[in-house]
Image (spheres, rainbow, N blue to C red):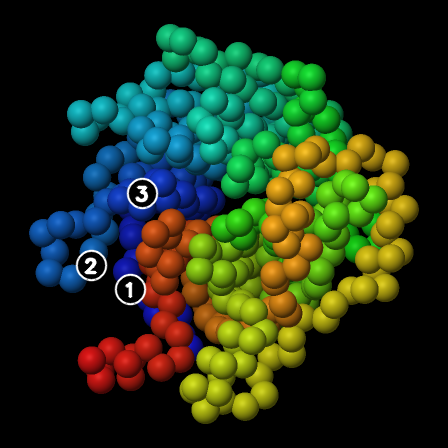
Amino acid sequence: MSLEEVQSLEGHTDRVWQVSWSPSGDMLASCGGDRTVRIWARDGAALVERWRCVAVLEDTHSRTIRSCSWSPDGRQLATASFDRTIAIWRHAGGVWENVAMLEGHESEVKEVAWAPNGSLIATCSRDKTVWLWEAAPGNEYEVVDVKHGHSQDVKTVHWHPRGEVLVSASYDDTIKLWVEEDDEWICAQTLAGPTGHMSTVWEVAFDAAGQHMVSCSDDCTLKLWACRKEAGELRWRLLSTLGGYHDRTIFSVDWSKAGLIASGAADNAIRIFGEEGAAAAAAAAAGEAGGAPAAAADEEALAAAADATAAEPGLRDIFMQQAHSGCSGGVGSFRLLCKREQAHPLDVNCVRWHPTDHTLLASAGDDACIKLWRWRPAGADAAAAGA
């Protein structure tokens, strides 16, 4: 099993904070400290797979661009900046145009996330708030709610794949799940306390079905969460903790549609995790023995946290179908499948799996580079040679 570098994309002149694949995977957006967004596309003229910069979006934000997010139809891109604004870009006829600017945050905007249905945009900020914006005719966006649930800088916002739940995570060490009730978004559950992270939570990601979630933190751990039906309501509970694999802050995590979890950290490394059964089979195929320990289940911590969320309203019936279809299970113990030391010479700020090519991973770092990686399971090269 290996993670092989296939290309380094250069052009940014300062750290790259985030990368984002378009829904179809035909383009990759990157943003960073140089106040630009770069759009990359596959070079159709190249004999081997190569990506090249096809557009630079600039002269709109006056400070670092911290985040970028595609609309579900792939025609628009939202960017969030430390200048307290969010820009909306539209791609038409091969030309990118800035069609709207969203203002209202009182401090640096840390992330922007487009809802799966395309009608809502979520943003979060150092001002401790989460904002929800709704698209209106004429390239207008209206604020539909502002949430003040966090006590510190909000690092990330992330939509559940079905779009009815918004997750936020913060410097206050908590993860909050928000749902809409009577035209207002309420906090349905807070993940904190004995089972939660002990320091800043940087990112979260869902599996393809939206039944499980992974989070990463300044406490150098990844936590796996599952929704469980309890007393007629669905609650998110800790399944396991992956610790000891990074020795500095884990800034980014992503869960591929093929079931692999990638993490990137301030130790300059990328790690790939998979389910215990798959890992054991892969290790056996490669003739490996032993390896990294499986994630330890936190059953005692689960019980200890029961009171931590009991006072908050439960998640709505939107998850009940998942509960009936096995939401409380389906993910076994995860273990380390692959580690790539010095993936970047400086901090790895972001990792993102390609939406359709499940072996292609993009990463971004403080070295001002984006790197593309190819995940190769054990035996893949031998199988290809035999074919």
Q: Is residue 377 above or below residue 315?
A: below
Three-letter code for the amino acid on which mark 2 is drawn: Glu
- Left or right relative to 196: residue 21: left
- Left or right relative to 194: residue 294: left
Quadrant placement of the N terminus: bottom left
Q: Mark 3–mark 1 contact, CB under 8 Å?
A: no
Report the residue marked by disc 1: 6
State the CA–CA distance, disc 3 to disc 1: 20 Å
Report the residue marked by disc 3: 24
Residue at image location 16% in from the left, 50% down from the top: 43
**Can residue 81 be seen at all in this image of the molecule?**
no
Name the spot of residue 95 as percent of width and height, x first. Answer: 21, 26
**Which picture quadrant has residue 59?**
top left
Q: Earlier in the sequence, mark 1 or mark 2?
A: 1
State the CA–CA distance, disc 1 to disc 2: 8 Å
Q: Earlier in the sequence, mark 3 or mark 2?
A: 3
Quadrant placement of the C terminus: bottom left
